[in-house]
Image (cartoon, rainbow, N blue to C red):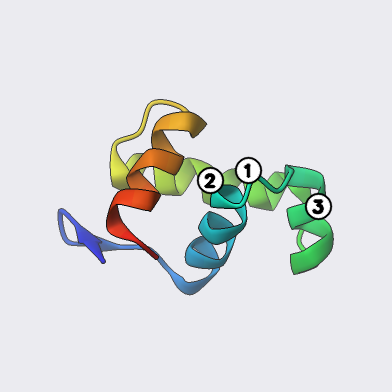
Amino acid sequence: MEFENEKLIEREIEIGNYLMQGISLKLIAEKTGLSKKIIAAHINNMKIKLRASNTTELIKALKAITL
């Protein structure tokens, strides 16, 4: 899954799958063992890579590329 030569890393894919399931940031942090701040950074990186301006657009983009 590429967008303009930038691939999502494994952790971003994992977090993206949780986002598509509607899981909260807090629960994603608990499931991954990462802080909410790190989760938010991964989400922001995915928004940049997929050119999404908000989380709703990000989720739509993630569903379109089918992780």
Which is more N-terminal, label 1 or label 3?
3
**Disc marking residue 52:** none
Is 53 drawn above or below residue 40 in the view shown?
above
Label 1 crowding class (10 Å Cα cut-off): few <14, some 14-19, many 20+? some
Q: Secondary structure at mark 3?
A: helix
Residue 20 coordinates in the image, percent (x, y): 54, 50
Q: Amino acid at mark 1?
A: Ala
Q: Which residue is mark 2?
A: 43
Is 10 drawn above or below residue 25 in the view shown?
below
Q: Amino acid at mark 3?
A: Leu
Q: Secondary structure at mark 1?
A: helix
Residue 9 left/right relative to 40: left
Residue 54 coordinates in the image, percent (x, y): 46, 27
- Real-space CA distance between mark 1 and mark 2, rounded to the nearest whole angstrom: 5 Å
Q: Which residue is mark 1?
A: 40
Is 15 drawn above or below residue 48 in the view shown?
below
Instruction: Tell me where residue 9 sits by quadrant.
Output: bottom left
Q: Secondary structure at mark 2?
A: helix
| Callout 1 touching callout 2 (CB < 8 Å) | yes
Residue 19 coordinates in the image, percent (x, y): 58, 49
Given the current orientation, which residue lies at the most extreme bottom position? 10
Residue 1 left/right relative to 20: left
Which is more N-terminal, label 2 or label 3?
3
Comparing labels 3 and 1, the label whose residue is closer to the camera: 3
Residue 11 coordinates in the image, percent (x, y): 55, 68
Image quarter where the N terminus lies is bottom left
Image quarter where the C terminus lies is bottom left
Is 22 drawn above or below residue 7 in the view shown?
above
Q: Which residue is depicted at the point 17% across and 61% down?
A: 5
Label 3 crowding class (10 Å Cα cut-off): few <14, some 14-19, many 20+? few
Q: Which residue is mark 3?
A: 27
